[in-house]
Image (spheres, rainbow, N blue to C red):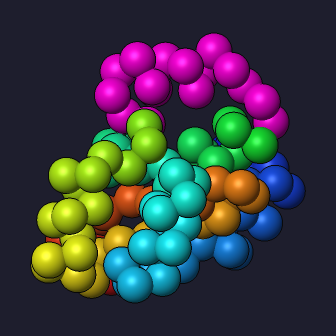
Amino acid sequence: MTEEVSTLYANLLGETARIGWAEIMPFFAKGQVLWVAPSLDLVAVAEAIAEDRGQEVAAWMQAGQLQRLSDEQASSWSENDPNNLWAVVLSPWVLVQAREASAQQ
């Protein structure tokens, strides 16, 4: 891979971390949690939002790959408290992604 990583991407990557449901819950209550599909690069999505790349963000939203965290998903996470959640804060949003088991290492 010869593509250069942008400074913004590198900064967001450095701020991305594993997180528990208890830490996400207050932001969910405020409507500030965006769910990112596992098929997308969490940091690339945050970068697109930060850079106001509206067409790209809208396409993900239309495809159901980026959306506000649903009540159903929140309820499931509240009951199961998964250990594979990753998040990056892009104020006022918290972008959250459940990573596939094979991607956790």
Q: Is residue 48 left or right of residue 77?
A: right
Q: Residue at x 54, y 66 (%)?
A: 27
For the C terminus, the quadrant is: bottom left
Q: Is residue 41 left or right of residue 81?
A: right
* Left or right of residue 51, residue 49 in this image: left
Name the residue rendered at 80%, 36% in the picture.
Answer: 51
Give the answer, above or below, for where 82 lies relative to 60.
Answer: below
| Residue 43 shows up from this direction | no
Q: Residue 53: x, y in percent?
A: 72, 25
Front residue of this view, candidates 23 and 60: 23
Position above or below: 40 against 90: above
Can residue 55 be found in the magenta stretch?
yes
Q: Which residues are magenta?
A: 51-66
Residue 1's x, y, as percent? Answer: 58, 47
Query: In this rendering, is residue 91 above or below 56?
Result: below
Please tell me which residue is depicted at 36% across the width and 72% down the height of the picture: 85
Q: Is residue 57 visible?
A: yes
Give the percent coordinates (x, y) of residue 62: 40, 17
Near-viewer residue (44 or 70): 70
Residue at screen point 68% across, 74% down: 15
Q: Residue furthest front?
A: 29
Query: Is 74 displayed left or right of 25 in the figure?
Result: left
Residue 43 falls within the magenta-colored stretch:
no
Which of 74/16 is in front? 74
**Residue 42: where, in percent of width, then height?**
50, 53
Q: How many numbered badges does the structure rendering display?
A: 0
The image quadrant of residue 47 is top right
To which quarter of the image does residue 104 belong? bottom left
